[in-house]
Each structure stands twice: as C-alpha cells, then as structure tokens.
Amino acid sequence: MKKRRLIMASFVIVLLLSSVVGTTGALASTLNDLKKEQKQNADKKSNLKTSIKNKDNAIKTTETEIQKFLNQISKLNKEIEETNANMNRVIDKINKTNDEIAELRESIEILEKKIEERDVVLRERVRAMQVKGGQVSYIDVLLGANSFADFIDRFSAVSTLMDADRDIMRKQKEDIEQLETEKALVEKKLEELEASKAQLEKLKANLESKKVEKAKVIDQLEAEQDRLSKEKSQLEEDFHETVEIEASLEKKVIAEQKRIAEIARKEAERKEAERKRKAKEAADRAAASNRPSALPAVSNGFWTKPASGRYSSSFGWRMHPIYKTPRQHRGADIAAPIGTTVVAAGDGVVNYAGTMGGYGNVIMISHYNNGQTFTTVYAHLSSINVSVGQVVDKGSRIGATGNTGASTGPHLHFEMHIGNWTDSGPSAVNPLRYVSF
C-alpha cells in the first residue's frame, strides 16, 4: 500500500510540474509517516533515557551494597586477625604449660625417687620390727641399759630414731601431697588453655563462615552489576541509534517539507494569473457537511483572513490561560463558535493534518510567495477536511473551528512562519504583518 502511495505521489508531482493538472488534487506524501516515525523515535528515545537512568541508579545501588559487604568483610578480617593473635597467645601459654609439665615430670621423677628411697627405709624398719617379734619397744631398749651412761646413749639413739621415723613419714606425706597438688594445678591449667583454644578455633571458624557467606553475596552482587552494566551498554547503544535516526528523520522531514514547498511554489506560479475566489464553493461544501458556515470575505492579494469571528488574542508574550505561566503566544486567535468554517489563508500544499499535543487537531500548509516560503498553522479545530499533500486554494475550506488541545474555548489559533514550521525558534511571525483581521 505504501509503495503504491509513493508511485502515485511521484506521478502527481510530475503532472503538477508539467502543468497538466491545473486544479486542486491530492498529493500522496510521506510527511505524515515521517512525523509519526519521528514521534515514535522520540518516545523510544525518552523511554531509553529513562531506562538508562534507572539502570544507572540500580548500578549505583549495587555498588553501595557491594561496598557495604566489603566493609563487613574488612571488619571480619580484623576480627579474624585478632582471634588469630589471641589463639597464638593461648598456644604460647599451652607451650609454656607443656614445658612446665615437662619440668614437673622431672620433679615428679625426683619425688618419686625420694619416695621410693623412703619406702625402702620404711620397709627396712618394718622388716626389723618383724624380726624382733613384729614390733619394737623403745621402752625395752631403754630398760635394757647396763649403766646410766648406757641409758643416756640408748635414750639418745631412740630419740634420734623416733625423730627420723617421724621426719620420714612427714616428708613422705608432704611430697605425695605436693605431687598431687602440682599435678592437679598443671592439668587444670592445661585443660583451661585447651578449652580456650577450642573456643577461639570455634570463633575463628564462625568468622570464616560469615566471611565466605558475605563473599558469596558480593559475587552475586558483582554478577548483578555486570548484568546491569551490559544492559545499560545495550540501552546506550540503542539510545545512540535513536539519536542517529532522529537526525536522519529530521533531514528527511526537512527535505519533504522543501519538496512540498516547491510544489506549492510551482502551483502558486501556475495559478497566479488565474486565482479566483472560491468562497461559494467552500460555502457549498460547508453546507453539505451540515456544519455552521461563516465564510470570511476573501481579500485581494496573496493572503486572506482564515476565519470569520472576533480577533481575541494577539501575537506576543502573555500569561497562559491554562498553565498560568508567562509564555509566548506565537499566533493570533479568532473567537468563533464551534464548526465555523476555516479556510486556507493562501494557495499552498498541506504538509500536516492531524493531532499534535496542545494544538489539538491542526493543519499546516506550505506556501510560496514572492520568492519566499511560508507555513501557516490552523489549530484547535473540530474537524479536518484536507489531507497531507493536498493542493489548496486561498479561501477554500480546510476545516472548522473547535476547542481541541490546550484550549479554554472555541476559537481558531492561527500562526504564520517564515520557512518551515518549527516547534521552537524564531520562525513564527506576527500574522498581522501579512493578514488583516
């Protein structure tokens, strides 16, 4: 279908340029399609920009999370180092205790040797007592003295012997108690140190486990960050592609507008000598559409008033009635009831017909006059009676006034641009410079 339209457009253009067609005809044009493609590309660009920003925020959030876990791992590393230091201190104590145990074992061996020697002495004493009837009576020894001097000697010997027996028994008891006490102390100390070491090892294992868990989380976050970065890169590639497409479409739109303007120029030159008033024909068409028709009087010269009604707002800066902010009013307003006939302000070719944001239903027409290209804009329409590429005559009906778009009441918003229409910039001029209201 699109190919057929392009073939028809080429055919009609050739007819116009050869002056075979002398009346208004429909020129199939790709300008509407280009503008739609422009809008779609602009929407895609905006969505991509938002997606890139969201990905960037997600990457930053992930970086923050990674840093948080890295800080936690750093803290765990310090705790592990501290635990290792504590373990080393405990191990040193254990080694010292083992040395003490080794020394104690030597002492034990000496004590055991002393005890063994005393055991021998005691066994000899017991054996001596057994030889004398199983017991030794120190009284018998004393009474068996031959003289007082012998008694004194025997008393001294018995006392010495009794003291020796008592000393042996006391030392034996003390050594055994000392041995048991030292054994118990060292074993308890070693047991406490081993328990402390086991507790530290358990703490270290717990810290290492936490470190491993946090490292796994970091791995997951880094993988997520890598995925987000790749998706962001792809979105950026798509965004750059839309920018390139945007530039390409802009060139195509400008070229198409120039093409339509050239057709308008040729048509204007062809019709300059035969321009006739078409008001009656426009009125007939308005009546056929069952809409109110108040055709404005068609002025002499190239331009005429686009609609009948009251001149309600001029060109220039004003407080916007809807947005309540100072904005430039880039056209002139004609207040008129909904359905009032709107006519082409001059001979030209329609380059846009459809809806456009705050303009509501809008028509744009390219004109050529005295070597200069113009674009006229008719906004807030209730109906559109022309299509893109259609050649229109000055004073011919193109639509009807309405209240569509950013409008506070039924009226026609009329703009004039030198050159092609632009959404912003100095192309708009005061219509009163060319059209009488």
Image (cartoon, helix red, strand yellow):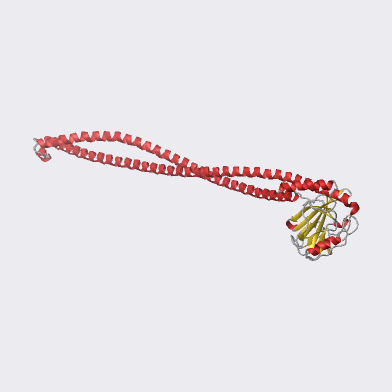
Q: How many marks do you count on the picture? A: 0
Q: Is residue 403 above or below residue 302?
A: below
Q: Quadrant of the C terminus?
A: bottom right
Identify which residue, 354 or 331, lies in the foreground: 354
Q: Is residue 75 visible?
A: no
Where is residue 266? Give x, y as percent. Answer: 85, 48
Where is residue 58? Give x, y as percent. Answer: 59, 48
Identify which residue, 47 or 215, lies in the foreground: 47
Residue depicted at 40% across the width and 40% down the height: 90
Identify which residue, 51 or 412, lies in the foreground: 412
Residue depicted at 74% across the width and 56% down the height: 354
Q: Is residue 55 left or right of residue 164?
A: right
Q: Is residue 423 left or right of residue 66?
A: right
Q: Is residue 21 visible?
A: yes
Where is residue 178? Give x, y as percent. Answer: 28, 40
Q: Is residue 219 left or right of residue 105?
A: right
Residue depicted at 68% across the width and 48% down the height: 45
Q: Is residue 111 above or below residue 239?
A: above
Identify which residue, 34 or 4, lies in the foreground: 4
Where is residue 425? Give x, y as percent. Answer: 79, 51
